[in-house]
Amino acid sequence: MQIQIRLSNHHPKGIQGLPGSVIVPEIIVIPTTLRYFYVLMSEVNLDAPFVISVQQFTDDDGNHTFQSIEVGPNTTSTVYINGMIQEGLTPGALTLYSPGDVLLAGTPILLEVLYLTVQVVA
């Protein structure tokens, strides 16, 4: 026994409906940048790992109000030492390790965190 199924592109036409409206939402990307600063009080030899806890950083106003870094697809963070981009950020602290290198007293360390939030307005 063989069953055949025939598909047809022919559909009965009904009455034309009212035209609808097209809603094109406006998408707004909202960047939020948080900056935290630390200045070395003494010379640091980086032959052994040097750890700066998040509580040691200050914000733009000099307050010790570090917010936790929530790493995700809409977040990026950058560390600058003496104005140069670096690697080595971990969630609870900044660990510096570079055998043979020394950081001098007064060296500024900047942690910059960029959060991107999307708002859809219909």
Image (cartoon, grey):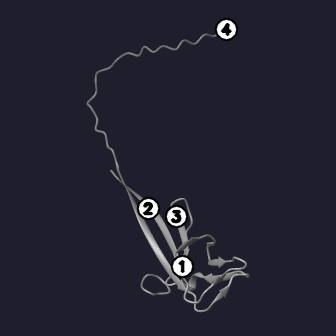
Could you give the CA–CA distance between mark 4 and mark 2, rounded to whole angstroms? 58 Å
Q: Position of residue 95 (x, y in %)?
A: 66, 77
- What label sits on residue 82 in the rendered view? 1
Which of the two marks, 1 or 4, is nearer to us in this view?
1
* Image marks 2 and 3: residues in contact by CB distance under 8 Å: no
Query: Can you say whether 111 is above or below 65 in the image?
Result: above
* Image marks 2 and 1: residues in contact by CB distance under 8 Å: no
Give the mark, 4 or 2, whose residue is nearer the N terminus: 4
Q: Position of residue 99 (x, y in %)?
A: 73, 78
Q: Badge 2: how crowded within 10 Å, few (<14), some, or many (20+)?
A: few
Identify the residue under disc 4: 2
Which of the two marks, 1 or 3, is nearer to us in this view?
1
Quadrant in the picture for residue 40:
bottom right
Q: Badge 1: how crowded within 10 Å, few (<14), some, or many (20+)?
A: some
Q: Is residue 93 left or right of residue 110?
A: right
Mark 3 residue element: strand
* Image marks 4 and 2: residues in contact by CB distance under 8 Å: no
Q: Residue placed farthest to the left in the image?
A: 18
Identify the residue under disc 2: 117
